[in-house]
Image (cartoon, helix red, strand yellow):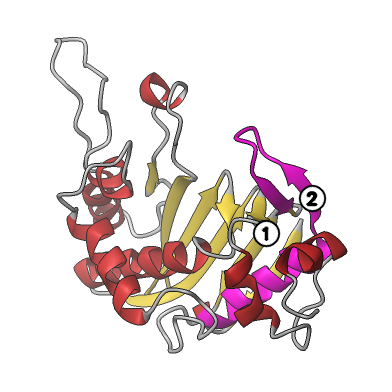
Amino acid sequence: MRCIRAHTLASAHEQVVKMVLEKGTPLTTENGEATVESEEVAIRVEQPGTPPMVSPSSRFSGRFMEQYARDLISGTGSVFEYDYHDRLFNWGEGLFSRDGSEIHSDQIAYIIRKIQENPSTRRAIAITWNPVRDQSLGDCPCLQLVQCVARAGLLHMKVVFRSNDMLTAAGANMFALVSLQKHIAGKLGLGCGSYTHVSLVPHIYYVRDAADIEPFCRRGEVISPIPEVCRSCGKCR
């Protein structure tokens, strides 16, 4: 496992993109897409709410990130195969209790309540995976687990992704989850502590998203990608 430490989300995003592009291995996914894939990585951001939260190299603007975060916390009217708001705030689709009623679990409310009841708890956890649905979904959740820990007046968040597109998705994922962290901390009257982001299979779609690589790479001045990535991008020729 590789470890990255950063003071801001923007720096964390830039460092992990560099790691995957320079240290990764080409792999064609089960959907036939060309990726470069790295070993698992743990990213710890010490001050996740401190600017800059968005790398200037990202394709997404701060305005987009803020809307994405609002959709995670408050929900959206758009229809997807799944969305993280429902998985965290209304988990249980397709599951039924013993009395036949549908299961609806607001896991964020549980996290808040659990920490209020016992600030030292290590059980303030939310999950997203639903075997009833996800074993047959074409597009299933990458985020798997969220844990919140209250220590010394701060709320720390730790998340686990089974798989993570580090070039285009990770920046938005981290921004939205830190926004959720701040939301929970506010409900508890705590400050915002560290944010730890674990990706078990970090990767980059180096053909599909070739145009997004150059702003991070800057024609080889900042990142020296593996040859397969450079050949696909072609910006330095």
Q: Residues within 10 Å of mark 1 (few under 14, many from 20)?
A: many
Comparing 153 with 140, the one in front is 140
Tags 1 and 2 touching, CB below 8 Å: yes
| Residue ID at (27%, 29%) | 92
Residue 232 lies in quadrant: bottom right
Residue 98 picture location, percent across and down:
21, 10
Residue 190 picture location, percent across and down:
30, 74
Which quadrant would the C terminus be assigned to in this image? Answer: bottom right
Comparing 42 with 228, the one in front is 228
| Residue ID at (46%, 78%) | 48
| Residue ID at (49%, 69%) | 171
Magenta part of the chain: 10-36
> Who comes first in sequence, dot 1 or dot 2?
2
Q: Give the residue number, with chain letter if any, for mark 1.
A: 206
Q: Give the residue number, with chain letter if any, for mark 2.
A: 26
Q: Amino acid at mark 2?
A: Pro
In screen coordinates, is 105 left or right of 101? right
